[in-house]
Amino acid sequence: MATTSLADPHRDAELDRLRWIDNIPFWGVHAAAVVGVIWLGWSWSGLAIAAISYGVRLFAITAGYHRYFSHRAFRTSRAFQLVLAVVGLTATQKGPLWWAAHHRVHHKLSDQPGDVHSVRQRGFWWAHLGWILVKRNAGTDHERVRDLTRYPELRFVDRHAIWFTVAFAIALYLVGGAHALVWGYLVATVVLWHGTFTINSLSHVWGTRRYATTDDSKNNPLLAVLTLGEGWHNNHHYYQRSARQGFYWWEIDLSFYVLKLLEVAGVVWDVEGVPRHVRERTIKAAAARPAPPAPPAHPAAPELSVLLPPREPPPPSAHPHAG
Ligand SMILES: [Zn+2]
Ligand SMILES: [Zn+2]
């Protein structure tokens, strides 16, 4: 299970203990990135390799793991669904089933007790990275992702997640030697990790709120640029089914622009936007309200009314763009 009852303090302490030995690879990648850059020295070509590696893999996380697997905000073929999964696996954030199952808990219980990564509940560093380093959140609640587990290929890649990231690192070394490994995997992965983590930590702390959601989510233009659009986090918590998280033209959302290009190319379709009446009416409604209400005593976030139930993508043959 992704979450566990808080009934037994001893068991909870054990489940929430930071497991330093188990997480040596995580800290090792950080250390190796620093040592690698000192050893090889500064390099503009290295920075370019890191930027490309960061951008491509982050897109697989933001558009794939987040907007597609977690929220089903657009449709695609079974083949491209697998491509998003495999590229996302090279980002070393476990598999799409694990990622989506935990993310759906975050939206279900947003900043209420039981939220897997809430600054309000357990502090900044827990929300940033502590929650992924403990036993409590190591497994996957497959009941939360039944729309995804029906694909055997997704279950397979999720189960063997680590080997895809190892293969990616080896491939970089074989193609470009230590230079490509250090910049393309080690440096890019550390930045990619913390870029993604900021959405769970900083985006619930730093920024402005357009919508009076029951959580602490914020909109932050700087984080939005750094994370390909994920920094419009208050928008996202308010209307989760949208593949577009920047609700206005000035709210830069690179993941959405790429998805629209892929839609023109026929690779994805039904890319959900934000209905104008939803966007504007909610702002007026929020402005008319005297103050946001206190969080409810039990975890029942009202924005769940717009969270699915998850859509089932059709088999590839059922859609004219498929294949
Ligand atoms: Zn989300
Ligand atoms: Zn959030």
Image: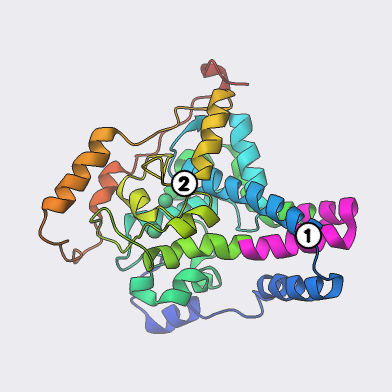
**Residue 2 makes an appearance in the image:** no
Q: Is 89 drawn above or below residue 26 in the view shown?
A: above
Secondary structure under badge 2?
loop
Segment colored magenta: 168-191
In this rendering, position of residue 115 left or right of residue 98: left
**Residue 92 makes an appearance in the image:** yes
Q: Which residue is mark 1?
A: 44
Q: Residue at 50%, 66% (x, y): give it.
A: 137
In this rendering, position of residue 9 left or right of residue 255: left
Q: Is residue 33 magenta?
A: no
Which is nearer the eye, 267 or 227? 227
Instruction: Tell me the kind of residue under disc 2.
Output: Ile
* Disc 1 crowd, CA 10 A, few/some/many (<14, 14-19, 20+): few
Q: Residue at 61%, 57% (x, y): give it.
A: 94
Q: Position of residue 65 (x, y in %)?
A: 53, 47
Q: Which residue is mark 2?
A: 252
Circles 1 and 2 in contact, beta carbons < 8 Å:
no
